[in-house]
Amino acid sequence: MSNESSTQSPEKVVQIRRCACVVKGGRRFSFTALVVVGDGDGRVGYGYGKGVEVPQAVEKAVKGANRTMIRVPTQGTTIPHMVVGRFGASEVMFMPANPGTGIIAGASLRAIAESLGVRDILTKVRGSSNPMNVVKAAFNGLRKLRTREDVSRLRGVQL
């Protein structure tokens, strides 16, 4: 691994799929990996990689995840406000929670919350629970998060 990814927490593999291609001698398998990477301090990204073997697919996905990193505003151990993200038939809801609540989430959203460094959050997935669409919907929602200071600056209003 390169030294730039050593600052991040270990990648969290959300999904691995096996695909079969039928050829003259039998079946040839390939693998895809969906990976979430974060630094545990408000930066998180996801990647999707394909390869002949699982480690190769995961490595490609991690490289993609490091390229798509976004900064997400946090407020203590949770998020500033409720947000809804949509992608395809998936709808993801993130709600702030009181300290001590923990991460109430399914596998895909738990990986994102842990990589992000959020320790108290409530989540809900509606519609399609396809991990790829759930992750994309989650990132759509996380991009909408704003702090009170950001909103006041954008509106030109004093708090």
Image (tube, rainbow, N blue to C red):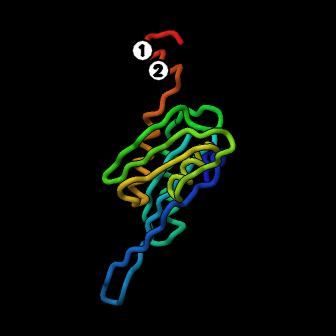
Residues at marks 2 and 1 touching, judged by CB atoms closer than 8 Å: yes
* Horizontal and vertical percent position of residue 155: 42, 14
Query: For this view, does 84 lie left or right of residue 70?
Result: left
Q: Residue at x 34, y 48 (%)?
A: 87
Rendered image: mark on residue 155: 1
Image quadrant holding the N terminus, namely: bottom right
Q: How many marks?
A: 2
Q: Residue at x 53, y 19 (%)?
A: 149
The residue labelled by disc 2 is 151
Residue nearest the observer in this picture, 125 or 54: 125
Distance from disc 2 to disc 1, alpha carbons, whole Å, reads 6 Å
Pointer 2 local density, CA inside 10 Å: few below 14, some 14–19, many at least 20: few
* Horizontal and vertical percent position of residue 97: 59, 40
Circle 1 — which element?
A: helix
Q: Amino acid at mark 2?
A: Val
Query: For this view, does 20 lie left or right of residue 65?
Result: left
* Horizontal and vertical percent position of residue 68: 46, 44
